[in-house]
Amino acid sequence: MKLPKPDSPVYSTFVLVVTAAILTAAVLLTDRKDITSAAVVLSAMILFLAGVYIFTFSKKEPIDGRISALLPVQGSINICRIVADLGISGYSWFLPAGYTEDNTTMQYLPVSEYHGEKLTGGTFVSGKGGSGVLLPPSGETIMSELKARYSLTIPDTDEEIAVCIREIGEELLEVADQVRVTVNDESFTVRMVNFKLADGCHQIEKESPACCMIYPCPVCSLYAMVLAEGRKAPLQIERCRVIKNKPEIETIFSLLPETSASEV
């Protein structure tokens, strides 16, 4: 039997209910029938109700952090293996609506260089625009949920996009203590400090550091979707670096069009 932790709601409820029972038993055993007994009975009722309240409205214990971090790992590795077997070695591009036949941001894994042409076709595309594999990004489900639940709107200026990414990482998803976004020339750099899913990144890096650039995890994929949708232009994951022995991740996204050098 797993005992509740001292800082868990179940433990607090147990203590309050037991204390209320002890106070009630003390009143019954002494049988004084005075104002002190009445006060003790009232205190017992308050403790009991407080325990019920804590138990009813407390959140369930979250899943173990390391297990959460490992959930998307094998899926990303499998996609990378399939892509490698197809002879595709280029890093992912994120294409907003208008650059494909889909009305949402898509992820493009090119066989050769991509120059911003519109792609036609389904999963496997070929032609003047380029050849490769076109897939929904792994962050698509989270993006849809954020838009539905929080009415997330993607801004269209660099400064507002940076703020949006910080709010998503720190406040909505709460996956990092700090999310720092820097715009420099034609790239965005996103650095997550104390990234709570870093164990998964370390695991993917053991398989191949290129996996994070070929088919990134849902979090980095989500940031790329925000950037592509906000700038209304394709961007590529240029580098994803796991800071050694630290829960920190630094990802660089290269923009296809020129961007004014600034820091947000």
Image (tube, rainbow, N blue to C red):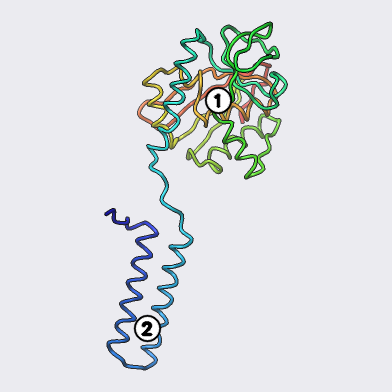
Q: Residue 138: give x, y in percent of width and height.
A: 54, 28
Q: Is residue 102 left or right of residue 209?
A: right
Label 1's element? strand
Q: Residue 150: give x, y in percent of width and height.
A: 63, 44
Residue sitting at 29 percent across and 56 percent down? 3
The amino acid on which the numbered mark 2 sits, given as a three-letter code, is Val
> Nearest the camera: 209 or 253?
209
Regarding residue 194, the answer to whether it shows in the image is no
Query: In which quadrant will I find the C terminus?
Result: top right
Q: Is residue 106 left or right of residue 191?
A: right
Q: Quadrant of residue 253?
A: top right
Which mark is first along the chain, 1 or 2? 2
Residue sitting at 40 percent across and 59 percent down? 9
Residue sitting at 43 percent across and 37 percent down? 196
The amino acid on which the numbered mark 1 sits, given as a three-letter code, is Thr
Q: Residue 35: give x, y in percent of width and height.
A: 39, 91
Q: Is residue 212 above or below residue 68?
A: above
Label 2's element? helix
Q: Estimate how packed mark 1 is, as few (under 14), some (14 to 19) or many (20 or more) residues with alpha carbons within 10 Å.
A: some
Question: What residue is shown with label 2?
Answer: 40
> Nearest the camera: 140 or 263?
140
Q: Is residue 182 left or right of residue 60?
A: right
Q: Is residue 134 above or below residue 140?
A: above
Q: Which mark is residue 189?
A: 1
